[in-house]
Image: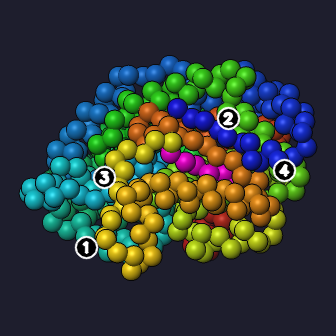
Amino acid sequence: MIRYDLSTALSFLEAHDLEAVRPRAEAAHRMLLERTGPGHEMLGWRDLLLQPDDALLEDIDTTAAEIREQADVFLCLGIGGSYLGARAVIEALAPQFRSPVEAETERPRLPEVLFAGHHLSGRYLKELLAYLEGKSVYVNVISKSGTTLETMLAFRVLRPWLEARFPDAARRIIVTTDPARGRLHDMAETFGYRRYAIPPGVGGRFSVLTPVGLLPIAVAGIDIRSLFYGAVEMCERLTDASDNPALDYAALRYLFHERGYAIELLAVFEPRLSGIGAWWQQLFGESEGKAGKGLYPDAIQYSTDLHSLGQYVQEGRRHLIETFLMVEREPEPLTIPDTGDDRDGLAYLAGRTVQEVNRKAYEGTRKAHADGGAPVSTVWLERLAPGPLGACLYFFMHAVAISGYLLEVNPFDQPGVEAYKREMYRLLGKP
Ligand code: PA5
């Protein structure tokens, strides 16, 4: 379901560089599998795939069906790992535009999934409340710690708003948090909110395949079983160190890191994959960026950004590598019409498809950027569907674990994110 093509990037290295680093990459891979590396207590994201909990998937599907039936808007409150995975999968797979059939019926068949609690904009919250007026709203508060300011502040605003409008407000609030502790856990107990657990051994950025991601994804009408089992399949496949694309990807990144490269761009040619880019950015940024190490991860969308960042990528400072995330099979091609004239200069494209043009844009960009001095490689996703997407999520999680171990950092902690919080809370006078 996932293929990794690193052939072009290899021309930037000596012939045996990749072979030379392989034993170290394999050792890092073993540390992950044998649970001997730093942060090994945070490998719950693998455990849940190794022992799938079908009853949980069914339970989530049942809750999602109720919400789909009752809600106009499903509002997810969460930040970082508590929203990026859900948003990524929904953006990748849910309809981009509401179909006329849905628009005509009184209630859209699928609720609109919205996000809040991922920043501190009062303006956003005010406009959101105005937008929600008159709609049937369900809220999913997602926070492992149950203390994150952005999320809890949004909930503090939404809770009385819901209570003032819906006699069954408590049923409309669903909490996803630590199974045993935290303020959010305690509030759920006190007020009788429905609760889903984030397993203690799963960090935020690795939690997309727990209820953190699965409930919003299921509400959006996406088949969570296929998504989950796509990840299971990839998890099984990547157990073997030989012919292992995640190991190759991690090893290649490491080689360029050691040669002084500072940035990795994850470039997509399909706007639906931009959310995966944002999720990947957090996954790699928080996992590797410590002890003065790590490639700075930047997600960009082509061909849009070829008209803004393209200049830098082509001719700017030569310290970046570029990874394309591409979809192999594109169904339902859109044929470019033959208008019978060439006034727009595009007659040469008539009868071909927009998908073909986009593919050529990728091929042209790959060649141009490589010629310009950027080592490029490509992760190929078989198709844009739940199974391959689940495989893709696991592929990157597996790769970042190996990558962290190659850099000799703990890929599963994030001590640095506390620094701004300390300063902010001091300024706010938090007791
Ligand atoms: O990956 C992480 O651990 C973080 O991005 C968290 O997900 C984020 O800070 C939100 O934390 P919490 O779920 O505790 O509100």
- What residue sits 49% from the left and 59% below the top? 357
- In the picture of the structure, the residue carrying the numbered disc 2 is 246
- In the picture of the structure, the residue carrying the numbered disc 4 is 12
Q: Main secondary structure of the magenta part?
A: strand
Report how far apart the C-alphas of labels 2 and 4 lie in the structure.
20 Å
- In the picture of the structure, the residue carrying the numbered disc 3 is 95
Q: Earlier in the sequence, mark 2 or mark 4?
A: 4
Does the Cβ of the disc 1 residue fall within 8 Å of ligand 1? Answer: no
- What residue sits 52% from the left and 24% below the top? 233
Label 3 sits on a secondary structure element that is loop
The reply to whether callout 1 and callout 2 are in contact (CB within 8 Å) is no
Q: Residue furthest front?
A: 340
Q: Seen in the image, is 239 located left or right of residue 52?
A: right
Q: Earlier in the sequence, mark 1 or mark 4?
A: 4
- In the picture of the structure, the residue carrying the numbered disc 1 is 130
Residue 311 visible within the image: yes
Q: Seen in the image, is 431 located left or right of residue 383?
A: right
Q: Amino acid at mark 3?
A: Pro
Does the Cβ of the disc 4 residue fall within 8 Å of ligand 1? Answer: no
Name the mark nearer the viewer: 3 or 1.
3
Q: Is residue 206 above or below residue 308?
A: above
* Segment colored magenta: 320-327
